[in-house]
Amino acid sequence: MFFKAGVAVGFIAAASAVPQAATTTSNPTASSTGYPLPYSYPQQPSVNSAAVSLVASYAGIPASEIPGATNAVPPVVSSQVTGVTSHGPYSGPPPTTTGAISNSPAGTAIPMLPPNPTALVYNPNGTLNNQQPIPYQPAGGLGTNGTEPVYRVQSDFDYQSILLGLYQEWIELGLFHNILATFSEEQFTAAGLTPSDRFLIEFMADQESGHATLLSNLLGGPSGATPQCTYNYPFTTVHEAFDFTQKLTRFGESGVWGFQAHLDSRECAQLLDQSIATEARQQMIFRQFAGLFPMPVWFETGIPQSWAWTLLAPYISECPANSKRLVWQNFPALNVLNQPNSARRNATQTGFNETTGFGPAAPSSDPPANETCVGYNVTGFDCSASVSQNRSVPLSYPGREVFLSWENPGKAVGPNNSYITATSAGAPEFVLWVSQLNITYSPLTNITARNGMNYGQTIQPDVSTYEGDPAINGTMFIALTDTNTSYTAFNLSNVNPHVAAGPFLYQAG
């Protein structure tokens, strides 16, 4: 038996440092505008008597004898939305506020400085170089001196980063429910999935409700957080839905890995890691549902916040008036015209425009029945939902010609069409490939422009993270730049002033 009763989150229940929103008593009814439930929630912990009775009945002992059973449990931000949450593109009035928020930046780029001298001092020689503070604990570390943890954002960087994360959690909550509401059990069965798989998606939606609650609390509750929006999804079939979702959860996870180590609040970073580790499992599960090899890389990559926002914004249709605005940049859109089609038996036969819908995470379209790998029960060529599928023919390969198109800046995107794509880069000359621990460049060639669009091509590089680990694999990121300056995983955001278009999710494997 699986109990879905609420479990008290100890640090929230006990630590007064966690921001608490004002208690409200609003009725949980849908708004007249079609948004999800109003963004006000009772923050007062309560006891779910029915759940407690169920647990006691199953255990066969009184609830009073079960530790924690009668403890009050903090509520989640939003009750579960079980209907279709995709509402198509924005069709409302022009926005009254446009663009990322700003307050007269001090400069245009972060300087590339030498290493901090103190980072080159410690000698990793296998001994203890400094006095231990207590037995069994070495000197050093952050937040290890006994100071009481404070679980709240500590800077504009913290606030805007976690606010972006909340936007991501909200769309995932809506998307998982939308998949269950859109496709029937019969359609799931035809895709090789079972009622247990549907329940797994439902449970992952429950996880997203918890993640949204956590991030909302770190942001201070409704006064500092943002409500759920409505969305525009680019799929029409079950397989397309899973391919889109494995891409969306890929950039959701990578977006957090890109900033969590830079947060001023180490407490927030700790809790964020514990939620994003769950998201990594979700991404792997949706790869399995899409018939892809579950984890074809040795390391997961991180991307800057502006990359994550560029990838996410096209799928947000409309947000309520009390939504909080983001500071991050929206780059001009990039598209791979011959994106490898993961639904083909032989992805090397992928033609042009074999994606469906729109945007940088557009899923592979379902090919004709005699070319699809879904339900094709031949080892090495099957991409039905499975714990693992190992392709005999790879989706992509070094030396592959990759054909690209990209937009000019100045396009309205995102919630209510209220953000504007922008770039400070010069003319693009390189394709930046970001995967695992590596970034590498390939030349952008045959550049042309017609009918307001730009076109070019490149060659997929052949690089490895370590021997035996091809760096370009899995669901990864590419962008166009005006320079081939070297960056690393920790300072990749310094490339932003040089990004002319992108990123785009390239289906390398």
Image: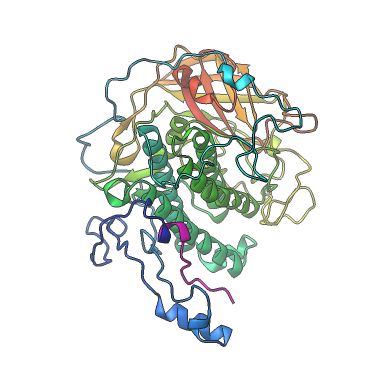
Identify the residue at horizontal 50%, vertical 15% (top origin): 428
Q: Image quarter for residue 16?
A: bottom left
- Residue 180 pos. (x, y %): 48, 62
Q: Is residue 28 left or right of residue 207?
A: left
Colouring scheme applied when the structure was drawn: rainbow
The vertical placement of 184 against 221, above or below, is below
Identify the residue at horizontal 69%, vertical 23% (top origin): 461
Q: In which quadrant will I find the C terminus?
A: top right
- Residue 289 pos. (x, y %): 62, 55
Identify the residue at horizontal 66%, vertical 45% (top origin): 135
| Predominant SS along the magenta part | loop
- Residue 122 pos. (x, y %): 66, 24
Q: Nearer the viewer, residue 326 or 388?
A: 326
* Number of numbered discs visible in the structure rendering: 0
Residue 5 on the magenta segment: yes
Q: Nearer the viewer, residue 458 or 164?
A: 164
Q: Is residue 84 left or right of residue 130?
A: left
**Does residue 235 show up?**
yes
- Residue 265 pos. (x, y %): 44, 39
The vertical placement of 155 against 370, above or below, is above
Q: Give the extent of the magenta segment.
A: 1-12
Q: Nearer the viewer, residue 108 or 472?
A: 108
Identify the residue at horizontal 55%, vertical 30% (top origin): 337
Residue 140 on the magenta segment: no
Q: Nearer the viewer, residue 353 or 311?
A: 311
Q: Image quarter for residue 488?
A: top right
**Does residue 361 show up?**
no
Q: In which quadrant will I find the N terminus?
A: bottom right
